[in-house]
Amino acid sequence: MAKKKKKKQTLDIFRTFKIRHYCPDRSWLAYFNELARKQSNAIRFANKRFKNGLDDNQVRAAISGLINYNIDNKGKKYIDPNTYQSMPTDAHFINSAVIYAEGIYKASIENGQDTLTFNQKAFDKYNKGEITKDQLKEERLFPIYSVGEANQKGNRKYNFLNHKKLEFKPNKKEHFIFYLNPSPNQEKYLLEIYRLANNKNAPITIMIDKKYIYLSFDIDHMNKNNRVCENKRVLGIDLNPNSLGLVIKDEEKIYKAEKIDFSDLRLYTRKGFASDSEEKIYLNNKKNHEVIESAYYVVDLAEKYKCEAISIEILDNMVARTKSRTFNRSVNNDFKRKLFKETIQKICIERNIKHLEIIASYTSFFGHVKYNHILGDPCSAAACVADAGIIELDRVANGEKRIAWFNKVKIDKSLYSNNAYLNQWKETDMNFSSIKDLYESIKKFLSKGNMYLSYHISYQASSIAWFKSRRSSVRCLSYISD
């Protein structure tokens, strides 16, 4: 019996663009208020029903049951446009409301929120007397939400007339034209969205309010430019709570080695601030900004040096449970590895750079063994991650099954000679069969703590500069540079 081929898994990376719009139709604001009121009612209604354990089909049926129908002479139901409706009557807007509410419900569960107040800031303003009740109702309106469908030219409620002109058609009678005012960076994405929509290649999910339009699509559908890159040249990244090491290399040469130091951004050193205080929020936002900027900097380097791929360690399930609360908090809470990784993934897809994920085991150890004569931690580990990336590129090119990179590395005994780290012990006491065996043979001579410290050794940088600007709290330490 023939085996079924596994479907190729694709990474869905959605990007949302907020763009200011202009509608010359004066009836638009009144129409928006009416439709947004109905769909907002449906979103809140659906969110409560999801909390009560209903599934999406049951929620749709419950919303449809609230529509006020009229009955004609033949006993058939119809919707009178003059009859008051508390919910949207269009099936697409009902379905979109249910999908939006389900997303809110799942996010609240992930964040551990038992109760959810929509637009709490508006309620606070109302309680302080800063806004009226009518203004509160307006503040609590959701944008009009329309789920994308690829076979409907991206979205059944919108026509992309060109990349700066959009037609919104909520029904057969009402049509509204919107002119978009994108930034230069947004314009290139709008051109791509226009192409995808008109070729029916991708769903474009759209939200719209009185001032802005929000376009969301999977950037994996974008046209990939044919990049000129050097074969098997990889940028390796070693991630740590306080810093990241990056090395650009191929099988013959190291072109660049840098360390980006995040030590000054560790929020737990800023004691005395409540979690909801302006100071704490500012510090958290600053750290997120610096991490995102560092991700862009890394990919820019990969493009500059014509790297074929970026290789990064898999640290998704890394949890620290030591006796040190400071260390645990640094690894589990303060370490923005997920944000950095997701940003790297998005930019790599946009710029057609291969993104490789490498098992983190033994990278620091073997990186120090192999590169201790020229690089310290974390750059030696980053060089090892780059080597693992080269192994992964070979595996993919040859169509081989995936196995851990350290099981494919063959160690030559000649590595022992003139190796300052290995020469601390006798060659006869070491097992060079594999990286794991070499690690275990050295581990016998050292305690757990001393084993860790033996290969986490930093070297003095050749130059130190502030990252991006003097206002940054991040330093960039260079070790090797072409």
Image (cartoon, rainbow, N blue to C red):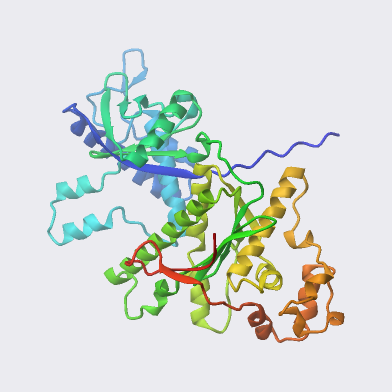
Q: At 26% across and 29% down in the image, what residue appears?
A: 178
Drawn side of residue 440 relative to residue 226, left or right: right
Measured as percent of width and height from the top left, residue 457 is found at 60, 79
The percent coordinates of residue 225 (x first, y second) are 52, 36
Left or right: residue 467 compared with residue 7: left
Q: How many marks?
A: 0
Q: Is residue 24 or residue 265 the one in the foreground?
A: 265
| Residue 432, picture quadrant | bottom right
Please identify the quarter of the rendering in which residue 26 is found: top left
Depth check, front residue: 283 or 67: 283
In the picture, measured across the screen, residue 9 lies left or right of residue 149, that is right
Is residue 348 shown above or below 92?
below
Q: Is residue 42 visible?
A: no
Q: Is residue 256 above or below residue 45?
A: below
* Residue 187 found in image quarter: top left
Q: Residue at x 66, y 40 (%)?
A: 8
* Residue 444: percent from left, percent from top: 78, 84
The vertical placement of 207 against 244, above or below, is: above
Tell me the quarter of the image containing the C terminus.
Answer: bottom right
Q: Residue furthest front?
A: 482
The answer to whether residue 138 shows anywhere in this view is: yes
- Nearer to me, 94 or 214: 214
**Residue 328 on image: x %, y %:** 53, 77
Question: Which quadrant: the N terminus?
Answer: top right
